[in-house]
Structure formats: structure tokens, C-alpha cells
Image (cartoon, grey):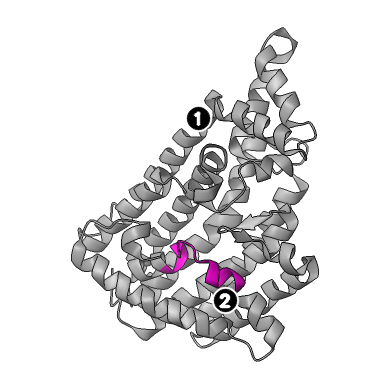
């Protein structure tokens, strides 16, 4: 998907530049997943061929426009972050038992869990090969990011510990599991475009916060959007008892009310905690939660995080690239898929 269709940019000339650069990334991405082994080639191409927003490489290319965006290292960095993201999707879909990804059957539904996990590992290996050509600093950043991705998934899997606030715990999970790679995407772009630290730092912080906003918006989309449009089955997280912000906010409401009230909220929570393996039960749960105020609260949180991301850019000089980063943050929380 081109930048102009996925995330409209305010400057037509910049949009044209990014569209051309993203086309190069797409070509390089397909080359990077090609494999001499026939099975590995087929499984590795599965999600690349399914498409996607290419959010992370686009952010790399966009952040690079704050410096010399034509440097060849920028394209390599964009390929690295998308390969890393694709690898995590193979693993995430196994852990979440997600039947669909980007409108296509998830890899584990086609080839089984073991093949899906190993394909994710192959893509991590290809990302490592590419990042090695960018130098020791890039390798270190990639390793740190990978560690945070794993920690985010680990902490999501085990849940909050005694004394942890579940909402704060979830936001930390989002910062690690989603925000860290989006932050690295922005950082790579600015860094390999030759930007000074006073630009690289704010852009990195912007990336992490916009990543949290993106995932909070996804929590709303999972309930409110048409599955045919998003390429995912609505309510998959509910079915698998994966925490999302609307459910956490509802649970907090019920706990705050205690035995003195909140009967409707408690009934809804009981429904969400019940067996949702049946499609009709899942549809009922999605519809009921969709109508609750916690969904609007989650969207408001997404907007707050997006604004906090934009605030990180205040020290940057005015430019079309800065304007585009602001528009990018806004588009992430206003999207329907």
C-alpha cells in the first residue's frame, strides 16, 4: 500500500518522494524473504504477499526526510524494521490463535504452529543479516529493540503481578511490544539520514508514544470495525482472553463499584470472562462491549498518546517532514482499519 493511500500526507511533493522510496523498500523486502528452500520461500512470502500498511518502513522513510533521506542506508533500515515486524506477526498469531492476518489465513492455520514459529525465526535471521550491514550501532539498537519486544510479549502473557495496576501494566506492555519497534523505525530513519542528536532524540520518543497510540486505536478497531476491512476476525483478543484497554477499564469500573452497584457492568464482565469459543457468543460479547463507554475512553486515551507524541516534535524546525509526522500521528488514531 502506498503512503498516499495508507496515510495521507499534507505535502504532495513529499508524498511523491515517499511513494517512490516505499516502492523500493517493497521490492527489497520481497528479495529479502526469498529463499532457496521451496517451503521456506512459500511460508516467508505469505505475509509479505498479504500486504499491509508498511507503517514502520514508512515512518523510517519519513523521519529520514528530516535529513538526507536519499541515503541508501535508509532503505536498508526500512527493510530491517518491516522484516522484524513480520517475524513478530508469525509468532503473535500462534500465541493468540488468530485465524486471520491481513485478510489471509494466518500462517499457523495453513502450515501449523511449528512451521509458523520457524518462519518467524527465519525472518528475524534475515533482518539480522541486513542490519549487520548498517554497522555496530544499528546491531545494538536492533538487539535492544528485540529484547523489548520479547519482554512486552512475556509481560502480556503472564499478566500484572501483585500490586501492579493493570492499566499501567498494559501501557508498559504496549510501549515494549509495539512502541519499541516503531520508535526504532523513526530513530533509524533520522539516524541514517545524518540527523544530529537534537533531532534523533525527539523523533525516537515520538515514535514510542505514537506506537502506544496506534495499539490503543487497534483495541477500538478490534471491536468497532468490519472484519472484512481490517483483515482480522473481530473480537479475537476477547476470545483468547488477551487483555485490551476497554476490558481493563471495564474491570476497573467493576472493582471500584464493589458490591454496591454496577450490575450492568458486572454482567458484561461476566459475559467477557465466559467461554467465547462459539461464534454467536463472541458476536454477542463484541456487540455489548462495543456499545459501552469504555470504548470511547480507550479512543480518548489513544488521542492523548498521539498528542503527547506530537508534543515531542515541538523543538524541531518547521518543515514538510515535521508536518507529515504530525499528520501521521493523527491518521493512526483516526483510521478505521
* Residue 154 horizontal side relative to residue 60, left or right: right
Q: What element carries label 1?
A: helix
- Front-most of residues 104 and 55: 104
Who is closer to the viewer here, 221 or 242?
221
**Residue occupying the point 55% across, 25% down:** 291
Most common secondary structure along the magenta stretch: helix
x%, y% of residue 34?
A: 58, 85
Q: Residue 159 carries which label?
A: none
Frontmost residue, 295 versus 305: 295
Residue 118 horizontal/vertical position (percent): 74, 74
Residue carrying label 1: 297
Q: Which of marks 2 and 1 is in front?
A: 1
Pick the quarter of the image with the N terminus.
Answer: bottom left
Q: How many labels does the image show?
A: 2
In magenta stretch: residue 282: no
Q: In this view, does 71 lie above or below 176?
A: below
Taking the image as shown, residue 164 lies to the left or right of residue 61, namely right
The image shows residue 251 at horizontal and vertical percentages of 68, 27
Q: How crowded is mark 2: few (under 14 residues within 10 Å), some or many (20 or more)?
A: few
Residue 140 — which label? 2
Q: Which contiguous range is marked in magenta?
A: 46-57
Query: How far apart in space, not on screen, are marks 2 and 1 (Cα)?
Result: 37 Å
Amino acid at each position: 500500500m502506498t503512503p498516499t493511500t495508507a496515510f495521507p500526507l499534507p505535502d504532495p511533493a513529499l508524498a511523491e518522494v515517499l511513494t517512490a522510496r516505499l516502492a523500493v523498500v517493497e521490492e527489497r523486502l520481497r528479495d529479502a524473504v526469498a529463499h532457496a528452500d521451496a517451503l521456506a520461500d512459500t511460508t516467508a512470502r505469505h505475509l509479505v504477499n498479504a500486504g499491509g500498511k508498511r507503517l514502520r518502513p514508512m515512518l523510517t522513510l519519513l523521519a529520514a526526510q528530516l535529513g538526507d533521506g536519499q541515503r541508501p542506508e535508509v532503505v536498508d533500515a526500512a527493510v530491517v524494521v518491516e522484516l522484524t515486524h513480520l517475524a513478530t506477526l508469525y509468532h503473535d498469531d500462534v500465541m493468540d490463535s488468530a485465524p486471520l492476518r491481513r485478510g489471509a489465513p494466518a500462517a499457523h492455520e495453513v502450515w501449523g504452529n511449528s512451521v509458523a514459529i520457524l518462519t518467524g525465526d527465519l525472518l528475524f535471521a534475515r533482518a539480522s543479516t541486513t542490519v549487520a550491514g548498517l554497522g555496530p550501532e544499528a546491531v545494538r539498537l536492533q538487539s535492544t529493540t528485540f529484547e523489548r519486544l520479547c519482554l512486552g510479549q512475556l509481560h502480556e502473557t503472564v499478566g500484572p503481578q501483585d500490586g501492579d495496576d493493570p492499566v499501567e501494566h498494559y501501557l508498559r506492555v504496549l510501549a515494549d511490544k509495539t512502541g519499541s519497534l516503531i520508535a526504532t523505525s523513526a530513530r533509524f530513519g533520522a539516524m541514517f539520514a545524518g540527523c544530529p542528536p537534537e533531532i534523533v532524540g525527539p523523533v525516537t520518543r515520538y515514535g514510542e508514544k505514537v506506537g502506544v497510540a496506534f495499539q490503543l486505536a487497534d483495541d477500538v478497531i478490534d471491536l468497532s470495525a468490519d472484519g472484512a476491512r481490517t483483515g482480522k476476525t473481530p473480537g479475537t483478543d476477547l476470545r483468547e482472553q488477551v487483555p485490551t484497554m476497554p476490558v481493563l477499564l471495564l474491570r476497573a469500573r467493576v472493582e471500584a463499584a464493589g458490591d454496591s452497584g454496577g450490575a450492568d457492568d458486572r454482567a458484561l464482565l461476566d459475559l467477557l470472562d465466559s467461554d467465547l469459543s462459539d461464534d454467536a457468543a463472541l458476536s454477542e460479547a463484541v456487540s455489548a462491549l462495543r456499545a459501552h463507554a469504555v470504548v470511547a475512553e480507550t479512543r480518548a486515551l489513544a488521542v492523548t498518546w498521539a498528542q503527547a507524541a506530537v508534543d515531542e516534535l515541538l523543538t524541531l524546525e518547521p518543515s514538510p517532514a515535521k508536518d507529515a509526522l504530525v499528520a501521521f500521528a493523527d491518521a493512526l488514531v483516526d483510521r478505521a482499519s
